[in-house]
Amino acid sequence: MIGLLVAAGFGLAFTLLGTPLFIRLFRRLGWGQFIRDDGPQSHHAKRGTPTMGGIIFILGSGLGYLVGHLVIGAPWTLVGVMVYLLMVGLGAVGFLDDFLKTRNQRSLGLGGWAKIAGQVVIATTFAIVALMAPEDEYSLRPASTAVSFIRDIPWLNLAAFGTVLGVILFVVWTNVIAVSASNGVNVADGLDGLATGSAILAFSGYIAIGFWQFNQSCSSANLDVDVASKCYSVRDPLDLAVVAAAIAGSLIGFLWWNTSPAQIFMGDTGSLALGGALAGLAILTRTELLLVLIGGIYFIVTGSVIVQRVYFKLSGGRRVFLMSPLHHHFELKGWAEITVVVRFWIIGGMCVAAGIGVFYLEWAVR
């Protein structure tokens, strides 16, 4: 518990106090945001605002995780490092995209397929390590071939298709989760503080899930007979909570500077990294399908883009929304930016609360 608090506290202090230094550095490097001409006119004032701020909370999260372990004298765990490296890897893909945008001063950085290819390489590496890593003392690997909701679903085990095909299907499934989550956060990152605030709520959800799984872990010797029948077979869940806390704390400090009017943007560097971390936590806590609720706001805004494009093609050019993603639709209807952001935070918080509620209810009635 102390390590969790220290990780969150250090991450918060690092980003809260260090972000102004990075803002000055990024301005000197010329890392300014490019703004689309077809978006809301109020956004043109944001042109040139420093971007790639994801670098700051990626560093803050890693240092928070490290300091949290140093304070309590506990070693890192494989699962904790895996989530962080997935975050770093997808953040690197986003950084390359951001760098090309700022250098060329165009809204297009990496091509769509190039970005997907980078995400696939990172996610595939994560999947192979998660499935093939040596077992711990409780015979647990970081992940299993079973698709999970609150826990692994026994009748939905991909290994039923054969060992080799099961591994291949798991790799594909991991890519679906990682690419969807990272692009979902990326789509939501369109207004000051929207993605940052909603991500704080989502990672807080995984703090609660990881801590609860630790208290009800099947590896605990203190479980009574009734609890043992519904314990969680998750590897090092407390350290997953520590990683989530380090990220959440870093995001709180970053939000101070990212809220409206934003002095810095996270860029694709940050949004892809956050989506990757959420995907990693979902896979390693065995709550893959629950991510649809925990990250519900991201699925809503991404869904609005899909609906808009499909309807546009099928209807011969008509639109469902004034503009997609959904938050821009409300801006064009006259809502103030801060109003859209806060209301989307509320929706995101309700989604997280629903996810945690479903998670606990399954345990309570099992």
Image (cartoon, grey):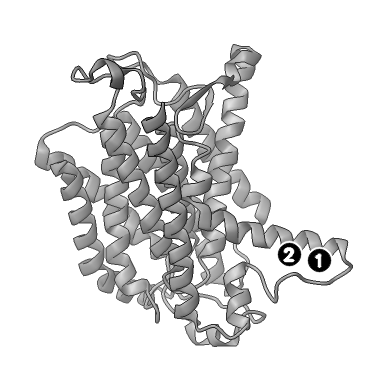
Q: Which mark is residue 262?
A: none
What percent of the width, then of the height, locates residue 45?
A: 50, 87
Determine the CA span between mark 1 and mark 2.
6 Å
Query: Can the viewer see residue 206?
Result: yes
Q: Position of residue 307 (x, y in %)?
A: 72, 60
**Residue that protrudes farthest toward the front in the picture:** 365
Residue nearest the observer in this picture, 348 or 114: 348
Q: How many marks?
A: 2
Q: Amino acid at mark 2?
A: Gln
Q: What's the residue at 39%, 26% (across, down)?
A: 142
Q: Can I make out residue 89 in this image?
A: no
Q: Residue at x 26, y 35 (%)?
A: 238
Q: Quadrant of the C terminus?
A: top left
Element assignment for label 2: helix
Which residue lies under the disc numbered 2? 308
Quadrant where the image shows the N terminus: top left
**Circle 1 residue:** 312
Under tag 1, what secondary structure? helix
Q: Residue furthest right?
A: 316
User: Contact (CB < 8 A) between labels 1 and 2?
Assistant: yes
From what the image shows, is residue 276 above or below residue 185?
Answer: above
Snapshot quadrant of residue 59: bottom left
